[in-house]
Image: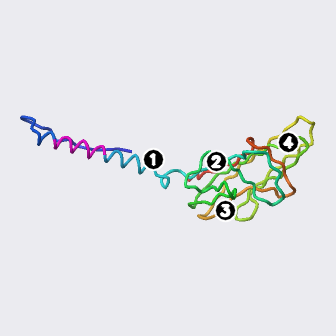
């Protein structure tokens, strides 16, 4: 970001007219700076595409049902829905997605990352350990997506019990 401006020098006596012109120039500069900052940093349309959400509570979810990460931390462009658990790409590009699952003792999960209903990445937590053993599994995928593609996580093998607060889903456009 750069800002170039010029203030005309004043010579002679400072009159109310001269001070008014100087004040007008300062106000114009402030307006320009405010516009640049708002356009570049505050408008969501110019913000990078990205989201991060986690499950607020422990859930048992049936096979094939979309996992809803209901606690949203970041969600530029409102592309992730905490109601449906789906992310819809607002722009074509290269995206990275990460999903982490914590399973309770004796529980299984077979998370899969779906794009338009097709599996593009998967993970498995086979937690047959002792009564106080929790297992975490994570995966990351980098995918070239088109505008409007829909991405979500679901178990592709069986019902899954997913530990809240420790299971999350994130995505961001790389370029």
Residue segment shown in magenta: 20-30
Q: Is mark 3 on a helix, strand or loop?
A: strand
Q: What element carries label 4?
A: loop
Q: How far apart are marks 2 and 1 (CA)?
A: 20 Å
Q: Residue 72 carries which label?
A: 2
Residue at 72% in and 48% down: 99
Disc 4 target residue: 104
Residue at 75% in and 58% down: 66
Disc 3 target residue: 150
Disc 1 target residue: 41
Q: Of marks 4 and 3, which one's residue comes earlier in the chain? A: 4
Please name whichever residue, 137 or 78, is drawn nearer the observer in this view of the structure: 78
Q: Percent from the top left, x then y, of residue 139?
A: 74, 47
Badge 1 crowding class, 10 Å Cα cut-off, few under 14, some 14 to 19, many 20 or more, is: few
User: In this rendering, is residue 55 above or below 150?
Assistant: above
Q: How far apart are marks 4 and 1 (CA)?
A: 41 Å
């Amino acid at each position: 970001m750069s800002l170039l401006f010029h203030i005309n020098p004043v010579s002679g006596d400072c009159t109310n007219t001269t001070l008014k012109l100087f004040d007008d120039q300062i106000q114009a500069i402030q307006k320009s700076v405010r516009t640049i900052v708002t356009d570049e940093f505050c408008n969501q349309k110019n913000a990078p595409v990205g989201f991060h959400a986690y499950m607020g509570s422990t859930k048992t979810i049936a096979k094939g049902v979309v996992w809803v990460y209901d606690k949203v931390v970041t969600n530029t462009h409102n592309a992730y829905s905490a109601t449906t658990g789906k992310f819809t790409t607002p722009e074509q590009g290269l995206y990275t997605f990460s999903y982490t699952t914590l399973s309770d003792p004796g529980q299984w999960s077979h998370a899969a990352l779906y794009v338009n209903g097709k599996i593009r990445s998967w993970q498995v937590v086979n937690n047959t350990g002792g009564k106080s053993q929790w297992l975490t599994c994570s995966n990351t995928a980098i995918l070239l997506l088109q505008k409007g593609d829909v991405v979500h996580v679901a178990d592709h093998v069986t019902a899954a019990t997913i530990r809240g607060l420790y299971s999350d889903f994130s995505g961001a456009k790389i370029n």
